[in-house]
């Protein structure tokens, strides 16, 4: 089950309805379904490629104009799912990289690209809750690997207006790292 599907809606009521319809129609697992800022609803599922694609199409077909974005991402790196579920801080790290987006979908794609491009750990994948609908990704590792991961993950995203900012911090202060948990 290496495929995720994600739906972002501008209506909480429609989001709940769509999540129910997706789960009843297809054999997929629910990673989460939750309301978020500013009045959006997010649904993330995983399963076999064909099942996830079918569930997302069902969600899109009944969204009635409330669909903000959707995504099917196959061969998702397991670190992305772990980060969504708040995996924690790696033992040792030389640097962290942070990517901030206007879109939750963009952050999921960036997180997956980062860990597939370079040997980094995903420290956090914050999906819009409590931060005005923005999202951000924090990766950690040696400085060179973090820079490579960040550059690869944001390549082209500034063009579509979803990238807010990015940074790489070498030797981050331990107090800052503790605050990220």
Image: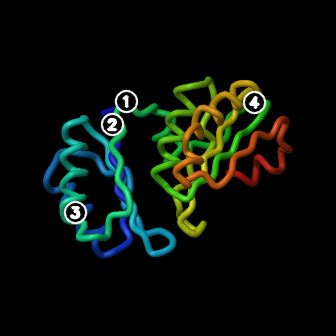
Tag in front: 4 or 3 = 3
Secondary element at image label 3:
helix
Q: Which mark is residue 124?
A: none
Where is residue 77? Give x, y as percent.
46, 31
Asked if labels 3 and 4 touch by Cβ distance under 8 angstroms, the answer is no
Q: Which mark is residue 75?
A: 1
Sequence-first disc among 4 and 3: 3
Sequence-first disc among 2 and 3: 2
Q: Which mark is residue 92?
A: 4
Secondary element at image label 2:
strand
Question: Does residue 12 appear left or right of residue 39 in this picture?
Answer: left
Gap between marks 4 and 2, in whole Å?
A: 30 Å
Question: Does residue 169 appear left or right of residue 89 in this picture?
Answer: right
Sequence-first disc among 1 and 4: 1
Tag in front: 2 or 3 = 2
- Residue at label 3? 20
Sequence-first disc among 4 and 2: 2
Asked if labels 1 and 3 touch by Cβ distance under 8 angstroms, the answer is no
Gap between marks 3 and 1, in whole Å?
A: 25 Å
How many residues crowd mark 1 within 10 Å: few (<14), some (14–19), many (20+)? few
């Amino acid at each position: 089950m290496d495929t995720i599907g994600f739906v972002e809606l501008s209506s909480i009521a429609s989001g709940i309805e769509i999540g129910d319809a997706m789960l009843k129609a297809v054999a997929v697992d629910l990673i989460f379904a939750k309301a978020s800022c500013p009045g959006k609803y997010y649904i993330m599922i995983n399963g076999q490629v064909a099942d996830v694609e079918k569930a997302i199409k069902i969600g899109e077909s009944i969204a009635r104009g409330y669909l903000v974005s959707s995504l099917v991402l196959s061969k998702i790196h397991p670190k992305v799912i772990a980060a969504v579920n708040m995996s924690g801080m790696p033992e040792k790290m030389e640097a962290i990289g942070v990517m901030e987006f206007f879109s939750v979908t963009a952050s999921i794609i960036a997180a997956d690209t980062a860990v597939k491009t370079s040997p980094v750990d995903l420290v956090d994948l914050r999906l819009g809750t409590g931060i005005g609908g923005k999202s951000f990704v924090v990766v950690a590792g040696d400085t060179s690997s973090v820079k490579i991961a960040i550059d690869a993950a944001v390549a082209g995203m500034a063009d579509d207006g979803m990238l807010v900012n990015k940074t790489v911090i070498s030797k981050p202060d331990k107090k800052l790292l503790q605050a990220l948990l």
